[in-house]
Image (cartoon, grey):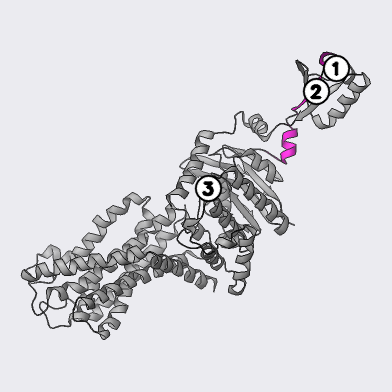
Amino acid sequence: MTEIRGLYTLWLREVKRYLRDRIRIVSSFVQPLLWLVIFGTGIRFSAAISNVTSQGYIFPGIIGQTILFTSMFMGISVIWDREFGFLKEILVAPVSRMSIFLGKMLGDSTDALIQGILVFLLGVLLGIPLTAVMFIEILPIMLLTTFGLVSIGLTLASFIENLESFGAIQSFVNLPLFFLSGALFPVNGPSLPNWLRIASNFNPLTYAVDALRTITLGRSWQPGPIYPLYYDLLVICCFDIAMIIIGTIAFNRRK
Amino acid sequence: MSNAIETIDLTKQFNGLTAVDKLNISVEQGEVFSLLGPNGAGKTTTISMLCTILKPTLGTAKVNGYDIVKQAKQVRKSIGIVFQDPSIDDRLTGRENLRMHADLYGVPPGEQKARIDRVLKLVELEARADDILRTYSGGMRRRLEIARGLIHYPKVLFLDEPTIGLDPQTREHIWAYIRELRQAHEVTMVLTTHYMEEADMLSDRVGIIDYGKIVALDTPARLKETLEGDVVTVKAGEAEKLSAILASDMGLQNMRISGDNLELKVPKGKTLLPKILEVATRNSIIVEAVSVREPTLEDVFLHYTGREIRAEGSGELHGMAAIKRRAIK
């Protein structure tokens, strides 16, 4: 019971902190908006995708991107907690490290999920064909994706000593994962070079974007989904489990 | 009854550097125990091990009867810690910080409100309890941290440099709370400090630590007595005459005359002073003024380590760093 209370209170902390950061919530609209309106309009004239609008095509990718960036950012924010001493308060508490990790992870995931929902609503406002059923189907996919991604962030944060390394995460983790995920162009297109196709196969976000796209676009477009939905979900779940285990171990290290 | 804390050859090395060297101390229940030493002496490392944040390289310790290595969780549950650096969430309110702590330490939900109100009252923060911590001053944050350390009724409270980087007024405030706590709750307290007056005023016993070793351990009063160095100053017109009489009648040595002042170095100034006055009166020497200066803990530290404690360079830097951290937020 103590463990669950501890987990709950850490979850609550993350969500409260997030909801109080109004500037970030507002600004979270801006990047997806730029991608969808400017980039989406721009590639309309050069896209090799048929049967769907370019906006509709990249929309699931932008949801994936938002989830990726938010999750990673939230996970890495443990560095802040450490820098400002708060992490110590948590680590000396008589709660297992597993609960600490899960509480933090679930809290951050909740925040990333809220960001994803906001982008979905933005898509509705922009006139992308979306339905209430899609919304309900998309929720668990987004949530499952955040678990693994937040865990990557938390794992990285446990190895990173200072805030300066923060920028490196953007260059070395976020952008490669984003570009190789099929968010902006099909990674299963017929003329794609092999290295890109292979690299994207090792990217967990590829499966998330593929799953999101299967929901929002169905199957009536070319080149169509990469994998069946169940396969995407299976890969994401395996990724989650692996990252949660790695993250807990990384978090558990005691000097 | 067993001791609240007992260390057995407690040792911590960092990359071959010995920060704490085979420490053997015991702290009685209900006692206020201070670890006094310059920065880098091993105070915080010792506390960190006792709080199960760091693992000892060698040896172990028992806190409230629990082994710090094998029973870390029980140890954590039975102690409260006020860290040297701020460790509160500045995006949450004071009350939210306290509630989170209560949850983490398994305080039953039904009791939380009453306990939180009580500790808030103790540190006089009731009026600001629902404000976001960013709006608190450094002293208020410190008080909140002390309050937080008490919510789960710890048997031992660790205070790591509780007043570092605070202004004198706030410091005295916090001392008052610490004394009050001790009387009202019978909490065993272990505090580290490099402020002499802090150790002197608050603690039952002081352990002077230097290079990871305890060099002296006793009550502040007895530590000072061991120096045999009270300075008694007697102001009298006939200082030289008095000096001669004291030497012949009482066998006193170590006297120095400067002007009308006769300075004596004696083991126990306070007990000797009445006798000196009696001798003076008997010999019709008019004494205008007397004073006894006790050696300070500073003298004690100097005596045992051969150095002055004020590693002020690093000490102040530490203080500044703490302030800076508070200011960043």
Q: For the residue carrying disc 1, how many other residues have a C-alpha within 10 Å: few (<14), some (14-19), or many (20+)?
A: many
Residue B243 x %, y %: 83, 16
Question: What is the CA distance from the residue labelled 2 to the residue labelled 1?
Answer: 9 Å
| Residue occupying image coordinates x 53% and y 58% | A92
- Decide: few, some or many residues near mark 3? Use Cα within 10 Å; few <14, some 14-19, many ≥20: some
Whether residue B230 appears in magenta in the rendering, the answer is: yes
Residue nearer the viewer, B329 or B71: B329
Contact between marks 3 and 1 (CB within 8 A): the answer is no
Q: Provide residue B83's location: percent of width, then percent of height.
A: 54, 52
Q: Chain of mark 1?
A: B
Mark 3, secondary structure of its residue? loop
- Residue holding disc 3: B57
* Residue position for label 1: B242
Q: Earlier in the sequence, mark 3 or mark 1?
A: 3
Amino acid type at circle 3 is: Thr
Q: Bounds of the magenta span? A: B216-242
* CB under 8 Å between discs 2 and 1: yes
Residue A51: percent from left, percent from top: 9, 80
- For the residues labelled 3 and 2, the Cα–Cα distance comes to 54 Å
Q: Residue at x 54, y 68 (%)?
A: B103
State the image quarter where residue B277 is shown.
Answer: top right
- Position of A125 relative to B301 (above/below): below
Residue closest to the far right: B282
Are discs 2 and 1 located on one and the same chain? yes
> Circle 2 is placed at which residue position?
B234
The subunit letter for the residue under badge 3 reads B
Crowdedness near tag 2: few (<14), some (14–19) or many (≥20) residues, C-alpha within 10 Å: many
Front of the two marks 3 and 2: 2
Look at the image and say whether residue B1 sits in the magenta stretch.
no
Query: Which chain letter matches label 2?
Result: B
